[in-house]
Amino acid sequence: MFIGVGAARVRDLFEQARQMAPAIIFIDELDSLGRMRGAYGLGGHDEKEQTLNQLLAELDGFDPSSGIVLLAATNRPEILDAALLRAGRFDRQVLIDRPDKTGREQILAVHLKKVKLNVDVMPDQIAALTPGFTGADLANLINEAALLATRRKATSVSMDDFNNAIERIVAGLEKRNRLLNVNERRIVAFHELGHAMVALALPGTDEIHKVSIIPRGVGALGYTIQRPTEDRFLMTKPELENKMAVLLGGRAAEQVIFNQASTGASDDLVRATDIARAMVLRYGMSEVLGHVAYEREHSAFLQQGYALPQSREYSETTADKIDEAVRQLVDHALERAIAILHKNQALLERTAIDLLKTETLAQPQIAILKQVIVREI
């Protein structure tokens, strides 16, 4: 609204800090102030750039012995102006990542003090079931578990409350008023069991935690929860192929039992195709196309040095080969899933009858299923 106000406030900020030294200047959401110059479209955005230029000028005259420490935080470091990050300015970057299992246990230890726990609650097991959860997610999980315990008029929070709270967060709220007809329930039951049985038959897949045909969230008519037993940072080609086979296990079960496909596998197909495309384009895991990266990770914001998402640096012939390689990976994963379920068809049909009666398969039933299933050779 007023030209030059941003730059004046930056000058005032540093002047106040010098008067109050020793002091700490902390700038939260630095990307709102330090976004790359020249990235605002035609005509630029002089006022924003003027504010950033003033900040850069203050940093140039920054005296390390003046007793002022300058810190900033951002969730989008890739869009910051390069001049901000050069040596002598914000040259030390500290990544605050999602906590690992040990970190989650320590965070849980802080938040669990606020609720009364049952003797069966094991923080290390909760930490193992929540890979990828942030501190805020874990605090929300404990709050959800306490609410569930309160609703059943319990005096303490049990491990079942935590398991149910994890399901609510991961899969959404139960929608028992979403009534499916008999045929749809059968399709959903076989679909979810297809995921579970393929996962149980393949080595190295994430552990099956629960299978249910109770509708949850916005669009889930059933769900199969897989929870990793450990934090993973790398995946091999066989592991990615197994992951695709598990994702397509639902579609495979529909093919084996009903000899037709339904719309229930739409999200599974998207996720499996994304994995296959990443294997071909980014990880160099296609024998036909070789160890070449045809795509790089795109920034969330247009900046110098990044190609436009729709641009590509390969020929039409290569594009055809990429499409064919992706299709072959997905088709092969589906064929593997179908082969596994054909071997276990009798077990699949028996288990589906139980699932339709109880609506849920928990750990004890899954453990029995794991012992009798015919695994992939």
Image (spheres, helix red, strand yellow):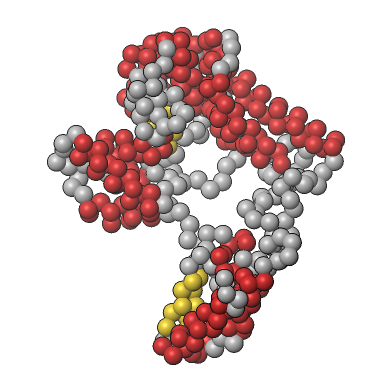
- Please state the horizontal and vertical placement of residue 322, each as a whole percent of the image: 76, 35
Q: Kindly tell me whether residue 100 is visible in this rendering.
A: yes
Q: Which of 78 and 93 is in front in this view?
A: 78
Q: For this view, does 325 lie left or right of residue 213? A: right
Q: Nearer the viewer, residue 16 or 325?
A: 16
| Residue 118 higher or lower than 375, as above or below | below
In the figure, residue 304 lies in which quadrant?
A: bottom right
The single residue placed furthest to the front in the displayed view is 1
- Please state the horizontal and vertical placement of residue 351, each as a whole percent of the image: 40, 14
| Residue 40 higher or lower than 258, as above or below | below
Q: For this view, does 355 lie left or right of residue 336? A: left
Residue in view at x 49 percent, y 71 percent: 27
Q: Kindly tell me whether residue 118 is visible in this rendering.
A: no
Residue in view at x 52 percent, y 87 percent: 64
Q: In which quarter of the image is the N terminus?
A: bottom right
Residue in view at x 19 percent, y 34 percent: 152
